[in-house]
Amino acid sequence: MRVLGHHHGDRSGDERGAQRSDNAPYDYVGTVKPMGKVSALAALLDCTDERIDRVRNFAALHENVVLSDAAALEF
């Protein structure tokens, strides 16, 4: 699940961005809710290897970006 932020309850801008990045949600949960100066909406995303590969390809992430616990503690 991902929370999308929207101005004035309009989700079209975020949807266009998600579609351009080949990362559009397949459905939404509930309705737009106010969160401070913006509104938010929960979106459902699948976590298949295909989606992960598309996101990594779009972001040019060609190496492992997940640290082990031990490596994270070194920071």
Image (cartoon, helix red, strand yellow):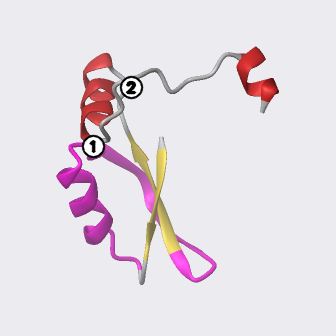
Which residue corresponds to the image point at 46% horizontal and 20% vertical from the top-left?
A: 64
- Give the mark nearest the N terminus, 1 or 2: 1
Report the disc number at residue 6.
Answer: none
Identify the magenta region: 9-38
Question: With 72 as the anchor, is 51 left or right in this view?
Answer: left
Amino acid type of the residue tagged 1 in the rendering:
Asn
Residue nearest the observer in this picture, 37 or 58? 58
- Mark 1 lies on residue: 23
Question: With 35 as the anchor, is 26 left or right in this view?
Answer: left
| Image vertical order of residue 35 relative to residue 19, above or below | below
- Mark 2 lies on residue: 47
Which residue corresponds to the image point at 62% horizontal and 22% vertical from the top-left?
A: 67
| Dot 1: element | loop
Residue nearest the observer in this picture, 27 or 51? 51
Which residue corresponds to the image point at 36% horizontal and 32% vertical from the top-left?
A: 61
| Dot 2: element | loop
State how far apart marks 1 and 2 are (Cα): 11 Å
Task: Please tell me how crowded label 2 is: few (under 14), some (14-19), or many (20+) other residues with Cα within 10 Å.
Answer: few
| Numbered circles on residues, count | 2
Q: Quarter of the image holding residue 23?
A: top left
| Image vertical order of residue 63 relative to residue 32, above or below | above
Quadrant for the C terminus in the image: top right
Q: Position of residue 68 (x, y in %)?
A: 67, 16
